[in-house]
Amino acid sequence: MKVWQYLVGGIAVIGIAVQFVPNELPAVESNNPGDLIGSGIVSEEISGILKTSCYDCHSNETQYPWYSNVAPVSWLVSKDVREAREELNFSTWQDYDMMEQLEKLDDIAIEVKEGEMPLGIYTVIHSSAKLDDAQRQLIVEWAEATMDVVVEEEEGTEEEIE
Amino acid sequence: MKKLSLLPVAAIVGLLFLQANPKPEADTMLALHPEAPALPADVKAIVQQKCYGCHNANSKNEKGKAKLDWDALEAAKKSKAMASMGKISEALTEGTMPPAKFLENKPEGKLTEAELATLMEWSAGKKKSK
């Protein structure tokens, strides 16, 4: 056997062995009563953008492509999705208190404005998730305006209690 | 727990003070920026001494500048200011500020317990003395 044959064989063996490393993709849940969409603070246009560009990681409604079950891609995918949901999960939006919602909206505006989100490694493969400048602008304006709405709503409910 | 039980007492004492001397400067500030939650003097003093060095618009510390600018916070509209306060509260709770790396060279930059308590109370409180 030639050297290259050993190499290819070795890589194949490692590639197969690696599939047996335990790894679990974060679960998908399509029934989310506390979702942002449906809370009344998003227009259809905005929810459309959020769904295509953010929801794969920042919600419980992840649409896993087939290769996200193949190691080592699966390791990256499960880590990114897990961390993304911890940071911001639109599926549980209504469980956040006012301060959390404000912080998250502020972060959305900052990250999207600066082009940090959606992550480059994600949009390279999911090109439909790429935001153009107009979409970026829309998301930033929505997030900033919604911060005021969140504060006003909270003040409204406080007055009702009083 | 003991400290927490002191809070109501502190609040009452604070109220008494407020009633005793109305602050004309604070009122004009509010009239000028009705939306801006003015920085209380005690908070501002700590910030000037312990935070502002990195967290200002001309800071050489790029990350510090990007994350928080106290002048911008003071000028920000209410919702934006509240979001920043929430993040400040988080950083203080986690103990990530001032950064450990920074304190290695400047141990005197550490927040004292009293200072930390003042900043925490301010950043966590929604709106107490109104």
Image (cartoon, coloured by chain):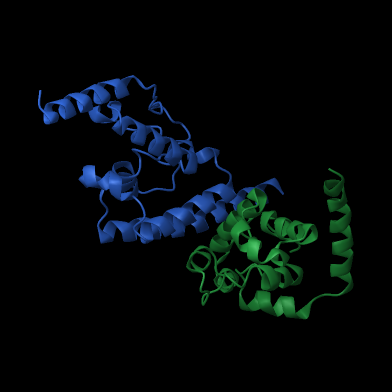
Coordinates of residue B95 in the picture (x, y in percent):
65, 52
| In this rendering, position of residue B75 left or right of residue A64 | right
Q: Quadrant of residue A151?
A: bottom right
| In this rendering, position of residue B127 left or right of residue A85 | right
Q: The C terminus of chain B is located in which quarter?
A: bottom right
| In this rendering, position of residue A90 left or right of residue A56 | right
- Seen at 62% across and 72% down, the residue is B52
Coordinates of residue A111 in the picture (x, y in percent):
40, 56
Which lettered chain is shown in blue?
A: A
Pick the front one: A92 or A22: A22
Coordinates of residue B72 in the picture (x, y in percent):
54, 71
Pick the front one: B15 or A114: A114
Q: Is residue B46 above or below residue A28?
A: below
Q: Quadrant of residue A21?
A: top left
- Seen at 32% across and 41% down, the residue is A51
Coordinates of residue A147 in the picture (x, y in percent):
50, 56
- Seen at 58% across and 44% down, the residue is A97
| In this rendering, position of residue A97 left or right of residue A68 | right
Asked if one can make out residue B22 in the rendered structure from this viewpoint, the answer is yes
- Seen at 27% across and 25% down, the residue is A14
Q: Is residue A51 above or below residue B18?
A: above
Q: Colour of chain B?
A: green
Q: Quadrant of residue B116?
A: bottom right
Asked if one can make out residue A126 in the rendered structure from this viewpoint, the answer is no
Pick the front one: B67 or B123: B67
